[in-house]
Image (spheres, grey):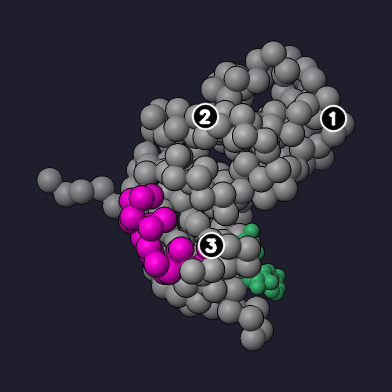
Amino acid sequence: AQTAPPVLEAEDVAVHYGGIKAVDGFGLRLPAGKIYGILGPNGSGKSTFLAAVTRLVPLTRGRLLIDGREYHTESPTTLARKGLARTFQTVRLLPELTVLENVQLGADTNASGGRLRSWLGRDKPSEAVEEAIERTGLGDVRSAWPGELSYGMARRVEIARALAARPRLLLLDEPTAGMNHSERQEVSELMRKLRDEGLAQLIVEHDVQMMVDTCDHLVAMNSGTLVAEGSPSEVVSHPAVQEAYLGK
Ligand code: ADP
Ligand code: MG
């Protein structure tokens, strides 16, 4: 039997900004239903790589494939249709909308203007929205305003909004940045639960412990290139990773 192609495949990806080689020859193959992590110090090119995968920045070189099919410039809507959703490094909730309404925004990435108002006015949220709220444990705060939430809860709403598009692959840029220890553990648990329900995830973080606790596989990045790849324990003990993090 033929094995399924990876959900996401990146080959020799480079993104240069003029003379700045933000990403310069990086790749990975993420199988369905696994959590992969990109580990790297600040400025190593992690966010730029996610921007490349979501086609927010043009590639200087390389190839990107979803389910074995190369894809090029896409709108967020076509990427969502291919099963890809993401969260950003900073929380981007709309303060004038409730938790439920913020999650509804994710169900249709085309949302704008009258169309947006029309389905926010609907009396019943879609099944996908209800499911996203339920999976992320936000039922009790669905009518709350973002300003009333703890930072950890606000992050959870971001994840719920991405899940409302029913992705098969979720990209998370520093999902636990600014969180305390117990909030981090909660998010890590949530990711593993979503993985066990079949959602592939690509996480970018510089918190080594969080990555070791959460990921099935790690890819270490430094100065835009891949420096090590393998199981979390292999990667964190790799000399290049030790050097990047501990100055050894
Ligand atoms: P990370 O997410 O790992 O902290 P980034 O991808 O944000 O790293 O940045 C990688 C490098 O690219 C950094 O040197 C950063 O200053 C540079 N960079 C990122 N975005 C831009 C941009 N829009 N224009 C120019 N340089 C950028
Ligand atoms: Mg970043």
Between residues 130 and 15, which one lies in front from this camera angle?
A: 15
SS state under label 1: helix
Q: Position of residue 76 (x, y in %)?
A: 61, 51
SS state under label 3: helix
Q: Would you say residue 235 sits in the magenta stretch?
A: yes
Distance, label 3 to label 1, CA atoms, is 35 Å
Q: Position of residue 216 (x, y in %)?
A: 37, 44
Magenta stretch: dominant SS?
A: helix
Between residues 12 and 233, which one lies in front from this camera angle?
A: 233
Reading the image, the residue beneath label 1 is 147
Q: Which comes before the other along the chain, label 2 or label 1?
A: 1
Outermost right residue: 96
Q: Relative to 11, does residue 29 appear above or below in the rendering?
A: above
Between residues 211 and 102, which one lies in front from this camera angle?
A: 211
Q: What stretch is highlighted in magenta?
A: 227-246
Reading the image, the residue beneath label 2 is 190
Disc 2 crowd, CA 10 A, few/some/many (<14, 14-19, 20+):
some
Distance, label 2 to label 3, CA atoms, is 27 Å
Disc 2 residue type (three-letter): Leu
Disc 1 residue type (three-letter): Gly
- Residue 67 left/right relative to 140: left
Q: Which residue is pictured at 58% across the width and 79% down the height?
A: 21
Outermost front residue: 248
Is the Cβ of the residue at disc 2 closer than 8 Å to that at disc 1? no
Distance, label 2 to label 1, CA atoms, is 22 Å
Q: Position of residue 197 (x, y in %)?
A: 40, 28
Reading the image, the residue beneath label 3 is 245
Disc 3 crowd, CA 10 A, few/some/many (<14, 14-19, 20+):
some
Disc 3 residue type (three-letter): Tyr
Q: Which residue is pictured at 50% across the width and 57% down the height?
A: 39
State which image quarter holds ligand 2: bottom right
